[in-house]
Amino acid sequence: MRRVLIPVLVPTLALVLALAALTGLAFATNPGSTVTKARLERALPAVFAHVYVQEQRLAGRTGLTVADLDPVAMCDRGGPSVADTGPGSDWVCLMSWQDPEVPMPTEGYGKFELTVRSNDCFTASSPSKLVGYATMTDASGKTVTNPAYEFDGCFDPDTSNTPTGHTFPSLLSLTSTTAQVDASGHPQVQLGCGTGSDGCAGTLTATVATADGSTGRSLGSVPFDLAEEQVKTVTLPGRLRAGDSQVVVTLSTTTGVGSSSPATLAVQGATG
């Protein structure tokens, strides 16, 4: 599938518009690299704004402009233990923009996955829940390539490397699909904390699910504190009894963002 390369990314990009066939270069962290967090945080929004407007025009929306979007990005390479510099396929950028017809999700941004090359060019994959899939239906009813789904861009290595100061909260998620039972009868669930500025912290509370939907027996509460891009198993203080088949888990965050709606999980393992 042909991807889109934006011919003008930022005012000084005219010298690097040709995306060379240098895709075989080795990826390695390089402290002296021109590939940096700050440059990506400036380049990605500029590129995305153009391809997003292209997508909307294909769909028949002609009133939306690049300036209307006002996109802002925060980028990270490989999590908190990896320096945010150098080419690689492990770059993630969180980005928000303004479109009244496509509101941001609860966390306030979309997640973009980037492969960045040592020639100061990159390929970005967009979040499909916000931009759609690889193909789309245009205003005339034809199936066409969605230019915003996956796109290429470049940045000028001589542009500012001053930190942008852009931050977004990490997204907390309940990664378990079942509640596991440990040897002592305590239910265990797994939490995940996504890319973001300060990790995830808060309290997990659980009860035994009841057939009539009323509040069941408490299994207690337990605090959690996760670094960004960390996964952790949390053990509840209460014990399950014979016949307990489901637990209801509720998350409350003090750092990071996440759903506060209760989640019902089937019990996996022996109880009683």
Image: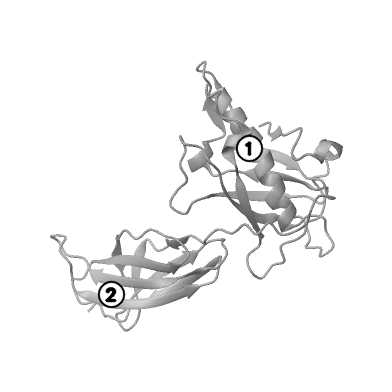
Q: Is residue 9 above or below residue 144?
A: below
Kind of residue at badge 2: Ala
Q: How far apart are the two marked residues, 1 and 2, measured between alpha carbons?
A: 53 Å
Q: At x 38% / y 58%, what residue is drawn?
A: 259
Q: How many marks?
A: 2
| Pointer 1 residue | 49
Horizontal arrangement in the rendering, residue 51 relative to residue 199 (left or right): right
| Camera sees residue 146 | no
Q: At x 78% / y 55%, what residue is drawn?
A: 35
Horizontal arrangement in the rendering, residue 266 relative to residue 100 (left or right): left
Outermost residue, front side: 67
Q: Is residue 23 above or below residue 50?
A: below
Q: At x 27% / y 80%, what residue is drawn?
A: 238
Q: Quadrant of residue 167?
A: bottom right
Q: Is residue 167 above or below residue 14?
A: below
| Pointer 2 residue | 270
